[in-house]
Amino acid sequence: MDFRLEDIDDAEVERRLSIVEPLTDAVRELVDAVIRTEVDDAELVAAREQIEAIVARLRAQQKDKGYGVSFTRDFTGMPWGNAATGARNAVAPPLRIKKVDGVTRADVVLGAAYEGPGGHVHGGIAALLLDQLVGETAAADHMPSFTGTLTVRYLRPTPLGPVTLEGRVTGTDGRKTFVHGELSDADGVTVEAEAIMIQPKHFPARDAIISTIAKLENERS
Ligand SMILES: CCCCCCCCCCCCCCCC(=O)SCCNC(=O)CCNC(=O)[C@H](O)C(C)(C)COP(=O)(O)OP(=O)(O)OC[C@H]1O[C@@H](n2cnc3c(N)ncnc32)[C@H](O)[C@@H]1OP(=O)(O)O
């Protein structure tokens, strides 16, 4: 698993976010516009040519594979390619999950790009968001938990538009954490999930990051 340490402070993380988040938002706008536009074929072809030029510009310097996950020495995560929440990933909805007193919450607007049944959220998207939610709910002490089992129950269709997510731990057993998650619209819960999250037995990436941080601290003292 690709975890890296970047020796930068939170101000630098914020600076980088201030550049990439508006770019990602602009690409989300593009995706939404492509889905909903009713311009004629000539306009579609002209737009495609402009988009291809922008893609070529961005490909001038590229990573070999996925973005991976970087951490600062304060363990601020930069999972910016993440499919559910990546700050650089326009495929992901603009999801920012906050944890307060052990309860995770997020508000997000799901537009045309997340449609399944006409006018409603795709079931796979609901599961994706709930998977991320239960993962962040179970994560503790800089230690991730991987999804072992995720059971999703669709109670009624979720209309496209604003939704909220909420997750809480319901129990633990050794390395297993049990999490309940909900996706709701203004009228209440539409999808609920039960997850068994598991802290992996071996997670060398975390140990490597912690020992690199210790080394840096030694060098500076
Ligand atoms: C560097 C700093 C990091 C900071 C960090 C910050 C985190 C910031 C939040 C990130 C949030 C991301 C949220 C995305 C969440 C995903 O999407 S994760 C991706 C999807 N999941 C996967 O790919 C998991 C693939 N599976 C695996 O890697 C391994 O099978 C697992 C799940 C880690 C378990 O492996 P293991 O540790 O070898 O487990 P093992 O010792 O066999 O079993 C332990 C216990 O779990 C049970 N168990 C094992 N597998 C399962 C299962 N699939 N279902 C139910 N129970 C199971 C066993 O029965 C056993 O139970 P007991 O006998 O103890 O009662």
Image (cartoon, rainbow, N blue to C red):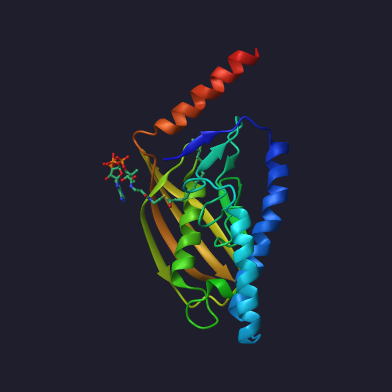
- Residue 146, placed above or below residue 32: above
- Residue 130, placed above or below residue 189: above
Residue 62 percent across, percent down from the top left: 55, 48
Residue occupying the point 54% across, 51% down: 81
- Residue 204, placed above or below residue 44: above
**Lateral position of residue 201 relative to residue 65, left or right:** left
Please state which of residues 148 and 73 is positioned toward the viewer in this rendering: 73
Residue 142 percent across, percent down from the top left: 51, 35
**Lateral position of residue 219 relative to residue 197, left or right:** right
Quadrant placement of the C terminus: top right
Please state which of residues 9 and 191 is positioned toward the viewer in this rendering: 9
Please state which of residues 194 and 199 is positioned toward the viewer in this rendering: 199
Residue occupying the point 60% across, 73% down: 48
Quadrant placement of the N terminus: top left
Residue occupying the point 64% across, 87% down: 40
Q: Is residue 78 visible?
A: yes
